[in-house]
Image (cartoon, rainbow, N blue to C red):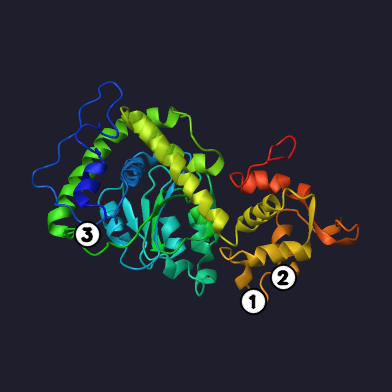
Amino acid sequence: MCKPETARRGAAQCNPRTPSPIPPPHERPGPPQPSPAGPEPTCAQRRPTAGWIRVITLWVAATHLQPAWQHAPRLAVVGPAKRCGKSRLLDVLTETVHEPMLTINTTPAAIFRSIHEDEPPTLLVDEADTIFGPKVAEKNEETRGLLNAGHQRGRYVTRVVGNDHTPHKFATFAMAAIAGIGDLPDTVMDRSVVIRMRRRAEGEKVKPFRSRRDIPALHELRDRIHALARPLLEDAANLEPDMPVEDRAADTWEPLVIVADLAGGRWPRLARIACARMVAAEMAAEEDHPSGARILADIRRVFFAQREADSLSTEDLLHYLNADAEAPWGERGRYGLTARELGAMLRDYDIRPGNVRMADRSQRKGYMRHKFLDAWRRYCPAVHPVDASCGES
């Protein structure tokens, strides 16, 4: 688990040889030394990698430059169970980010009325599983919509105000840290830098977080970050960094990479390495999710195992999918994945069954391999890659 002294140093430095994350571009001062009276190590993240600490550091620094960004990355702090350090990490973030706004029992209307377009706060949402869980998700669609819209500048909600019911636009743009058990909704995860926590093992020692001792040092660090960051607003807004990822992942990670570029030293390289690795890990997790591209990835494996057959009957394809002990399909219902369910899942990718000719020259309902090629390249490109020109592995 992350130790607050490490987290505290992380927002300004990773180690005594690494420069401060946001030094002025004209002079690159050495890192400020931690105060001797600063907090002792305590819990913020369970068994963190150095990459995660750097990413959290860059995200915290980015909150102090929000007016410069086109996109407001969410920080998704998720874990499989209770007591993984999610709330403790949010405690540290609360004391170091720019203008923290805790959304405890707060309505969406109160949130967007608290967001100022020129100087947005940093939203902090704990116990998100109580908001987006299966029993309450429908009641909180407005909150999810607010978090989705606020990822991009210029997205507003319109409400009528006053006795004359005058329509008024409210800004939604603001960075947000969201903590909860299990993954957040797909649309939120897709807009997030994801930090996956795990519980501290027996024998791993941490020192408890103590508000009286630790918060003053965290506030001192916050103020130093802010003082370094604000003169760089124009520089940050004008930078267009080379990104190791594309599309929405690039939008989400761009503010962190810009902060790293402003810092110089080892930060630009380390930030891009962390970005590429963490985005790849989330793409792999998405492919494993039954509601995502998992079905495409598993069908790709079936065709590969069948020596790239031109077609497979629906019956044979279902047999191979349901027989895979490591896949979830055989556990769906009494008989596993059915033809109707398979057709419904593939329809989202514009793939439909048709008449296919079998080896014995008979015709049966099934799927042609070439119908999958475009979807495979788009949604599971790392699973037995197919060539874009000829469709071969």
Which residue lies most toward the left here? 36
The residue drawn where x is 16% and y is 54% is: 214
Q: Amino acid at mark 3?
A: Glu
Q: Which mark is residue 204?
A: 3
Rendering quarter of residue 16: top left
Q: Amino acid at mark 1?
A: Gly
Q: Give the spatial CA distance, label 2 vs label 1.
A: 9 Å
Q: CA distance from mark 3 to mark 2?
A: 47 Å
The answer to whether residue 148 shows anywhere in this view is: no
Q: Is residue 353 left or right of residue 256?
A: right
Q: Looking at the picture, how far across and down is residue 136, in whole percent?
A: 49, 73
**Res 253 quadrant in image:** top left
- Judge left or right: residue 251 versus residue 205: right
Q: Which tag, 3 or 1, sits closer to the chain's start? A: 3
- Quickly name the residue at label 2: 338
Q: Earlier in the sequence, mark 2 or mark 1?
A: 1
Asked if the residue at tag 2 contacts the one at tag 3, i.e. Cβ–Cβ closer than 8 Å, the answer is: no
Q: Going 44% across and 28% down the picture, which residue do you hit?
A: 239
What secondary structure is marked by label 2? loop
Please provide percent x and percent y for residue 67: 40, 39
Mark carried by residue 333: 1
Looking at the image, do the residues carrying marks 3 and 1 touch, with CB atoms under 8 Å apart? no
In the displayed orientation, state which residue is furthest to the front: 360
For residue 370, above or below residue 210: above
Label count reads: 3
Mark 2–mark 1 CB contact (< 8 Å): yes
Q: Nearer the viewer, residue 66 or 127?
A: 127
Instruction: Name the secondary structure under disc 1.
Output: loop
